[in-house]
Image (cartoon, helix red, strand yellow):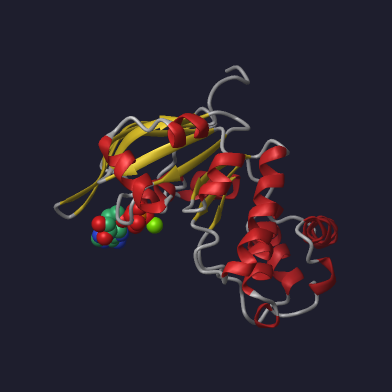
Amino acid sequence: MTTSEPLIVLEHVNKYFGPLHVLQDVSLSVDRGEVVVVIGPSGSGKSTLCRAINRLEPINSGTITFDGKELPAEGKALARLRSEVGMVFQSFNLFAHKTILENVMLGPIKVRKEKPTAVRDRAMKLLDRVGIASQAEKYPAQLSGGQQQRVAIARALAMQPKALLFDEPTSALDPEMVGEVLDVMTSLAKEGMTMVVVTHEMGFARHAADRVVFMADGQLVEQSTPADFFENPKSDRAKDFLSKIL
Ligand code: ADP
Ligand code: MG
């Protein structure tokens, strides 16, 4: 195994919901340190793709490997995988009755059985990094949506993941809060975090992505550099999608 081996590899992945073929022969590999932005119309399978990568959704055929190993189906290996692949959703899902700091500390203590003192230190550093250290003792409802989503990112980072998956992390936010969350994501990207980001924020795709992947109807239709994708989309479906949003 060399360090140049991709971190995430999907090969010929198929997924059905009943008769609906939501992932159709999807193959994709994500290098270490790479930022891949997934875009495409609603219902095209972007969330299912993200969820399949940390096995929140089982697949029907094909293989997904993470860090050289096929995704485990259950047990301790699955718990370990989930702790190595952080996920940030549209809805922040913070625990309402725990403080911001407690929210960030919970995973490492409960799942990884780490010592609270060490975790506390790391959690405070992470809150500082996302610009929320001064809110550590508050409760989620006392924070704005943008602040809560930054806490959710700190919570994911507290598990020291090898990759982060973002599923429309700014879609539930008021417009004035989108920027602060994208700024945190951009700095993570620059620091070399491996990221798969589903988003409609085309500015982020242009400036932070190494690669843009366009999905439609369960298929990975095209992938290229952001410059290439936005200036020179190849498929009719990508051209059509871009004409509607740009
Ligand atoms: P996207 O994130 O691109 O909007 P999704 O991955 O959420 O797309 O959904 C892809 C397709 O799968 C959609 O047609 C959606 O309605 C369907 N779907 C998603 N989750 C389920 C589910 N749990 N059961 C049945 N159908 C689902
Ligand atoms: Mg979705």
Q: Quadrant of the N terminus?
A: top right
Given the current orientation, which residue lies at the most extreme left position? 19
Instruction: Please provide percent x and percent y for residue 33.
Output: 63, 32
| Residue 219 appearing in the image | yes
Measured from the top left, where is residue 238 in percent x and y?
A: 33, 40
Residue 87: x %, y % from top left: 55, 54
- At a point 70% along the width and 56% down the height, the residue shown is 113
Q: In terms of depth relative to the viewer, which is nearer, 183 or 107?
A: 183
Question: Front-most of 175 and 99?
Answer: 175
Q: Is residue 24 left or right of residue 162?
A: left
**Residue depicted at x 67% and y 46%:** 186
Residue in front for this viewpoint, 89 or 53? 89
Residue 70: name its quadrant: top left
The correct choice, above or below, for 65 with respect to 196 in the image is: above
Farthest residue, direction top: 2
Image check: 7 left or right of 149? left
Number of marks drawn: 0
Horizontal side of residue 50 vs 236, given as left or right: right
**Spot occupied by residue 156 in the image (x, y as percentages of width and height):** 64, 55
Instruction: Write down which quadrant ligand 1 falls in.
Output: bottom left
- Give the quarter of the image for residue 60: top left
On the question of residue 155 being in view, the answer is no
